[in-house]
Image (cartoon, grey):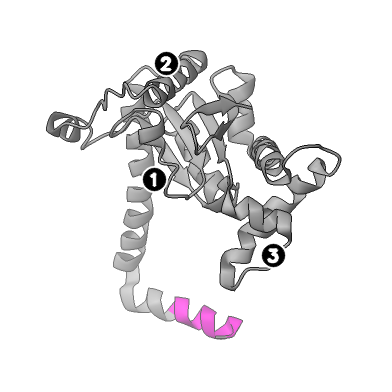
Amino acid sequence: MNQNNGLMGRRNFLNLTGNGGIALMAAVAGSAFWGVQANRAIAATVEPPSPDAALKRLMEGNQRFVQHKAKHPDQSEARVKEIAQAQHPFATLLTCADSRVSAEILFDEGLGDLFDIRVAGNIVTPEVLGSLEYAVAVLSTPVIMVLGHERCGAVTAAVQGERLPGSMNSFVKAIKPAIAKTKDESGDPVDNAVVANVRYQIEKLKQNSTIVSERLLDDKLKIVGGRYDLDTGKVTLI
């Protein structure tokens, strides 16, 4: 469709619908706006913990998981009903999509406790960035953890310079800038790249989001990196 046809399409739509069509469009836009406002208002009724307290809770949960002393909180029928109309997670996790890296299990939390964003290689794409901004601006989560993990397949592919089929190569491309910073490091190149990638994605998050950077300046937000050990279950802060 060329530009003129697109313009005619919009004119025809308005001619067909008249004022009612305009009102309908406004109502749809308005409902989306007020939906965000309502979520923000609901979240504001729950006082979030401080960034340090939120991080402490995360790490204590991981310690329980490692020690096989998990409490499995917030997984009851009562919890399902409690959070049906509103969510107020105390932390946001950007993790890899790997099936072995499930945040609620690793940190011994339950429904409504964590705002999870999962993508191969825990990379900050525009869509991921928008999700993180939603967590900060609307849900007021006080801590974001970018969590990489041992033997990450996406990072391994990037280190080995593999070109993957289909759209899979997109996350390899997103990780490659981090690998350049590990050239002179000793040790395992994949594990070095896992840590470097976490740091690189945090840098991207800070540089590309005014919403996030303002919360950091106001001391209402803490961003940390983590590395998950597949063999032990332990999360180490980077």
Label the magenta part by its dominant secondary structure. Answer: helix
Label 1: element kind: helix
Q: How far across and how far down the image is residue 41, in percent?
A: 34, 29
x, y percentage for residue 236? 57, 26
Q: Earlier in the sequence, mark 3 or mark 2?
A: 2
Which three-letter amino acid code belongs to the residue tagged 2? Pro
Q: Residues within 10 Å of mark 3 (few under 14, many from 20)?
A: few
Q: Which residue is mark 3?
A: 162
Give the CA separation, mark 1 to mark 3: 43 Å
The span picked out in magenta is 2-11
Q: Is residue 105 magenta?
A: no
Q: Residue furthest left?
A: 77
Which mark is drawn over residue 151?
Answer: none
Q: Residue at x 60, y 81 (%)?
A: 3
Vertical placement of residue 130 versus 115, above or below: below
Task: For the N terminus, give its image quadrant.
Answer: bottom right
Quarter of the figure that contains the C terminus: top right
First reached walking from the N terminus: tag 1 or tag 3: 1
Determine whether, in the image, residue 43 is placed left or right of residue 188.
Answer: left
Which sits earlier in the primary sequence, circle 1 or circle 2? 1
Residue where numbered disc 2 is placed: 49
**101 vs 79, nearest the viewer:** 101
- Rendered image: mark on residue 33: 1
